[in-house]
Image: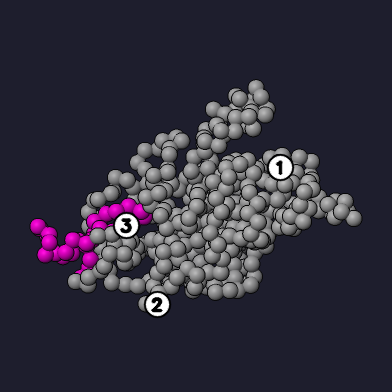
Amino acid sequence: MLDDIINSLKGISGSGNVLAEFSKLLKDQTLTVEAGDVSGPSMTSAVPVAADVWYLFAKENFLANYFTENIENRDYTTYLTDVFDFLLPGLKPMRFLENLDQLIPETIKNPFAVFSERTEWANNGVYWVNTLIFELCQHDIGVQYTSDGPRDFSPNNYVGYLSFPMGQLGVMEVISLIQETKLRGYAYDGISIHPADVIRFTEIPIPSSREMFPPDDNTGLDYCYGKHLIEKAYYVPIEATAEPAASRDVELFAKHEKTGETSESIQPKKWFRFWLHKDSKIVPGEFVGILIKPLAIPPHVWWFQESTPLLYAGNWVETSTLTSGIIISITLEEDRTSGDGDEYEVDIQGVKVIMYASDFFRYTVGDRVAIVKIDSINEWQMNSFTWKEQIAMKETDKDTIKTNYIIIPAVFYR
């Protein structure tokens, strides 16, 4: 009977949840799913195929936007520590092998070098976060890159979308969306909101052991923080919790009437779109990220990653005229040697710059404040605002005075 059960499970792509639970029942026995795919108490192995590793084919590293020079194999560790302190404990971006050429000769001479030279493979990955692209619309202005939209799509109900490159389903157990304001907390409509109040999945990521295959965390099915866009490797959630179900807003996969969403092709991947409903709550200027949690059983080669889930994509999402930042320090007018008004050090896009307020309303350290982009308010926006028009704050902006940004007394509610 046991043989019949195992045979019935063979060849089921994306059946990781079933297989994971079943393998636990086997205890000391070994489960073979396909030729080369083995899971047991003392070993896990798999034959890597293209479908397993689509997330390692990366384009346009979001992390590179901060730097003025494009340096191959840059170490982003300090930048991540300084800027993304709001991320969940242990959560890491994926590590991407940017320069494969230095490793190929060894594998040609010795096909098993990928295992024997484990340390070299494990230490040569570059932190990589795919650029999350977005498009935001004003009233009566549609999106430039149109598509069919989610189920029962009505364009009048949406104000834009977020989009990221994605491969075939069945590889990731969970794909979820996270927001900076939900991790830090933010007062919508003057009411303080804590992450646990607005989101169902509050589990923290589990650090990996830097192995060839993702660890089985033994925490149950679909264990992952964030608003789940995909569960059980294929399933778009249809049950509403504290927020509307993802099925209302998810489009798999977007087919565009226009091309050129990025400067580089993402083939063989396609675009996964999450449409922003008019009732969505995204604060202009906050970081929005995508987490992916690879299936642990059957094992999928993931090349010595550092956490499960992984931070796969992200961006600061602003509107054409509005963004936001966090007050770091204040120099009161009476303490200034020159100039009028209070002077604010503001963290915007992870960069600390100097700004002034529109009036005499006084803010406090730690406040997330609304910011108007002065250069934009006099320009009539004939098209939607996209990530292409957004200005990225860079390392050279640090500690500079931004007179083209001004703090206003506003609270974002949608």
Which residue is denoted by mark 2 in the rendering?
A: 191
Q: Residue furthest front?
A: 28
Which residue is denoted by mark 1 in the rendering?
A: 43
Q: Nearer the viewer, mark 3 or mark 1?
A: 1
Disc 1 residue type (three-letter): Met
What x and y, as percent, mark residue 371?
31, 64
Q: Looking at the rendered structure, which numbered label has been put on residue 85?
A: none
Seen at 22% across and 68% down, the residue is 358
- Image quarter where the C terminus lies is bottom left
- Image quarter where the N terminus lies is bottom right
Residue stretch in magenta: 330-359
Res. 64 image quadrant: top left
Q: Confirm whether the magenta stretch covers residue 337.
A: yes
Q: Is residue 27 above or below residue 194?
A: above
Q: CA distance from mark 3 to mark 1?
A: 46 Å
Q: CA distance from mark 2 to mark 1?
A: 50 Å
355 relative to 115 in the view: left or right: left
Disc 3, disc 1: CB below 8 Å?
no
Res. 376 image quadrant: bottom left
What x and y, as percent, mark residue 60?
48, 45
Which residue is denoted by mark 3 in the rendering?
A: 347
